[in-house]
Image (cartoon, rainbow, N blue to C red):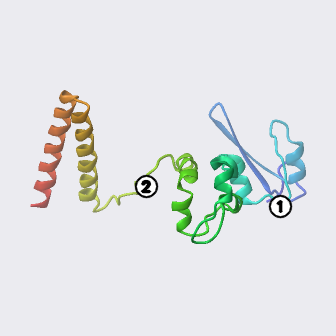
Amino acid sequence: MLCQSCGEREANVHVSQSINGQTRELHLCEQCAKKAQGVNFVFHQGLSMPDFLQAILGFSPAVGGERAQEEACPGCGMTFSQISHAGKLGCAACYAKFERNLEPVLRRIHGGGSHEGKVPKRGGAALRNRLELKKLREKLRQLVQQEHFEEAARVRDEIRRLEQAVGGSQG
């Protein structure tokens, strides 16, 4: 695809701008992108994906402090600073060794601390019901512990209703 500005060079910069709900896409060559008004770029030769992710996500070797940088993984020998520079872990033991440093980064990237997964639409009703029951039982336990008994009674009734529905669909 040719640059939409000069029409001479290959477009290697693709920009999407959303202004007041209107999306506009630009396909520019590097030279025209540098001159574009309202679009600020900084081009670094050799910018790697890990460096890009570090810049975007704030993933930096200093997250865990100086001591974490010096400690090495017992499995592969990588330090946290090496992991942050490479953008990937060396082995499974790195998760345990650098858990304290990785958790905030993973939460920021994934939006939570646990993997929920997806349930297939077809044939996944029983699994969805079991997951819902599990969540409701945990919520009930928390409500009783906090002594919110009226809300706990509503959740208990919802659990009973769902258990009856699950029992009726299995029989």
Residue 132 percent coordinates (x, y):
27, 48
- The Cα atoms of the two marked residues, 1 and 2, are separated by 34 Å
Please state, as top left, top right, bottom left or bottom right, where the C terminus lies in the image: bottom left
Q: Quadrant of residue 89?
A: bottom right
Q: In the drawing, does residue 36 fall left or right of residue 58? A: right
Residue 46, numbered circle: 1
Q: Is residue 118 above or below residue 17?
A: below
143 and 2: which one is in front? 143
Q: Is residue 115 left or right of residue 41?
A: left
**How many marks on residues?**
2
In the orientation shown, which residue stands out farthest toward the bottom?
76
Q: Amino acid at mark 1?
A: Gly
Crowd around label 1: few <14 · some 14–19 · many ≥20 (10 Å):
few
Residue 146 percent location from the top left of the image? 26, 31
Which structural element holds mark 1? Answer: loop
Which of the two residues, 150 or 84, is positioned nearer the viewer here?
84
Res. 6 in view:
no
* 90 on left or right of 55: left
**Residue at horizontal 60%, vertical 66%?**
73
Task: Tell me where residue 90 sits by quadrant.
Answer: bottom right
Q: Amino acid at mark 2?
A: His
For label 2, the residue is: 115
The correct choice, above or below, for 71 with respect to 137 in the image is: below
- For the point 31% across and 61% down, the residue is 122
Residue for point 90% across, 43% down: 35
Residue 41 spot, x, y in % from top left: 82, 45
Which mark, by number, is residue 163?
none
